[in-house]
Amino acid sequence: MDQNSQAVSKVTVPVILDRKLRGEKITCLTAYDYPTARLVDEAGIDMILVGDSLAQTVLGYNSTVPVTVEEMLHHLRAARRGIRRALLIVDLPYGAYHVSDEQALACSVRFLKEAGAEAVKFEGGRKRAGLVRRLVEAEIPVLGHIGLTPQSIHTMGGYRVQGRTLDSASELLADAEALEEAGAFAVVLEGIPRELAAIITRRLRIPTIGIGAGPDCDGQVLVFHDLVGLSFAPRARFVRSYADLAETLRQAFLNFRTDVAEGRYPDDHESYHWSAALREQFEKEMSRPA
Ligand code: KIV
């Protein structure tokens, strides 16, 4: 029982691994602050990712490259306060694991100790296998991420679907297998053809979590702002918007502006009042000659 006496079946890494054995789908959404993390958690989503996509969705950078460890920590702490059930995963931002494995370990330890992360994610396949091993040895669960890896925007030359040739598909399969072998508990497959995602999913014992990788993955992840229609970027083919919050918010702001301008907000019910006795007393005071 938790502090509010409601049973909460906490999602852990073993629970996620077990889902694949049972053939039960896994859900994951990004969240970067207290209210969204809380709503996502209360909806029963299994994993919450404080993704470095927050660079674009909430900080207004034009790629994920500039976001810093301190910025990630700030959002991770806020999300942590809203979560009771979901597994909380955080991205290592660009530059936090590219200098050395020791640097990556130090950053991951901060995310766990100072902000309550339960796992870390970073981009790359075979070239990150050693780092995955190092972190797993330090009791830090790792979620891999291959395919379209946004931190490689400059080497990819843009956000492009990967694995569209036989060679690149074989490379991605080898990457996925290397991450599993190194001890990752699951792998995000981003922006790859569904046929390749299906093959990787069949070949791995650990779950695959797809984003733009078709329906055959063991789970699906979406960016919160895409799911609720709160993004300014053109919508990618794989995004399904379940709400149009941008339009709802725009309308709310316009309505507020008009109501204030036309004196309709606030009305009497939205105002505080004196008691009748106080009003009478005040009126008496005011009518007394000076
Ligand atoms: O940063 C992020 O939101 C991600 C997801 C797209 C998987 O890495």
Image: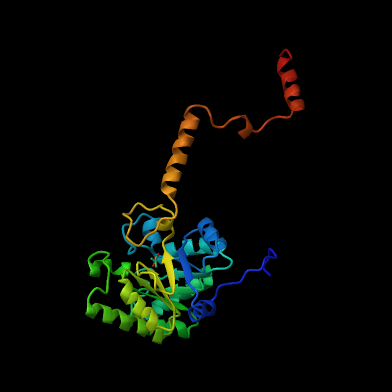
Q: Is residue 276 left or right of residue 185?
A: right
Above or below, comparing residue 230 to residue 101 in the picture:
above
Rendering quarter of residue 15 = bottom right
Residue 180 place in picture, x, y as percent: 40, 84
Query: Where does the C terminus fall, quadrant-wise?
Result: top right
Residue 3 place in picture, x, y as percent: 68, 65
**Residue positioned 40% across, 87% down in the render:** 181
Whether residue 274 is visible here, answered yes or no, is yes
Query: Where does the N terminus fall, quadrant-wise?
Result: bottom right
Q: Is residue 240 left or right of residue 152?
A: right
**Residue positioned 53% across, 73% down in the render:** 113
Above or below, comparing residue 115 to residue 273 in the picture:
below
Q: Quadrant of ligand 1?
A: bottom left
Seen from the viewer's position, the closer of residues 216 and 108 is 216
Residue 33 place in picture, x, y as percent: 49, 58
Whether residue 98 is visible here, answered yes or no, is no
Please identify the residue farthest to the top as the structure is shown: 289
Exactly how many numbered labels are in the figure? 0
Residue 74 place in picture, x, y as percent: 47, 61
The image's colour scheme reads: rainbow
Seen from the viewer's position, the closer of residues 258 and 190 is 190
**Residue positioned 56% across, 32% down in the render:** 266
